[in-house]
Amino acid sequence: MSERFRVRCSDAGDGTGDVYVPLPEQLLKSAGLVLGDRLSIEVRDGVIELRRLPDTAASSMALAAALRAETHRVYRRALETYLPIPSGATEHVIHELIEAGFLASHLKALCDQGKIPPAMQDRVIPLKRLVSRCKENQSLSLEESDRLFRLVHVIAMSDAVFGDQEKARRWLSKPKRQLAGRSPAELLSTSAGTHQVEELLIRVAEGLYS
């Protein structure tokens, strides 16, 4: 795109360091963007690059960001301990990591350390296939990496909300009335189910549910 636009950044004023960047309507139209699109923003050589992020990483990170600032920082640190995702990684970077595929050995290590129970691991990849991938030092497929990210994302969120891993695992494994009698862990096999669990965790963090 050859046309240049000038925009002004404004501090959000909430102590988070976030800024508002109003984008001209003409720019949105020329870039094929609409209100509600999730974007990653990177600045390279004085040029702002915008990319649409319609995937799991974008929607999941957006919901996690709804947590209080301190809880969100704990969440990002927890996420980093489970997967090689730097705490300052943008949504686009996370998207690229998922696309590249996480090493099968990362999931195996989490299972061996007891951080991911067998029932949850099976929702990512069957154990026999996981062991075979590890022996060959292979990565998970895109779909498997996406499922692993969803799982670890929710585990990290629950760790941050409850402040205790054991309590977080109990919460994930017990049926919830708000989830039609199913446990949060059961819903992590789909994006829609994961979204329900994320929203419930945010309500728990706000003191609306336990």
Image: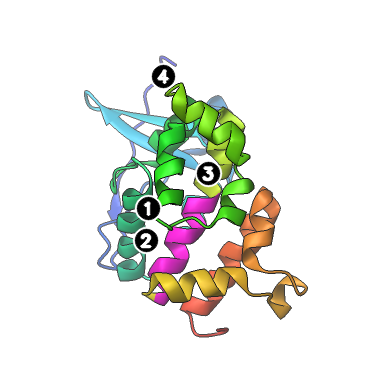
At 50% from the left and 69% from the top, the residue drawn is: 169
Q: Which residue is mark 4?
A: 3
Task: Give percent across and percent down for residue 13.
Answer: 28, 66
On screen, residue 86 versus residue 31, left or right, reads left
Give the spatial CA distance, label 2 vs label 3.
16 Å
At 69% from the left and 53% from the top, the residue drawn is: 192
Residues at circles 1 and 2 in contact by the CB criterion of under 8 Å: yes
Q: Could you tell me which secondary element the residue under label 4 belongs to?
A: loop
Quadrant (top left, top right, bottom left, bottom right) of the C terminus: bottom right
Going by the numbered disc 4, the residue's amino acid type is Glu
Q: Which residue is mark 1?
A: 79
Q: Which residue is mark 2?
A: 75
Query: In the rendered structure, which segment of residues is drawn in magenta?
Result: 151-162
Q: In the image, is residue 25 above or below residue 207?
A: above
Query: Local crowd at mark 3 within 10 Å, few (<14), some, or many (≥20)?
Result: many
Task: Give percent across and percent down for residue 152.
Answer: 47, 52
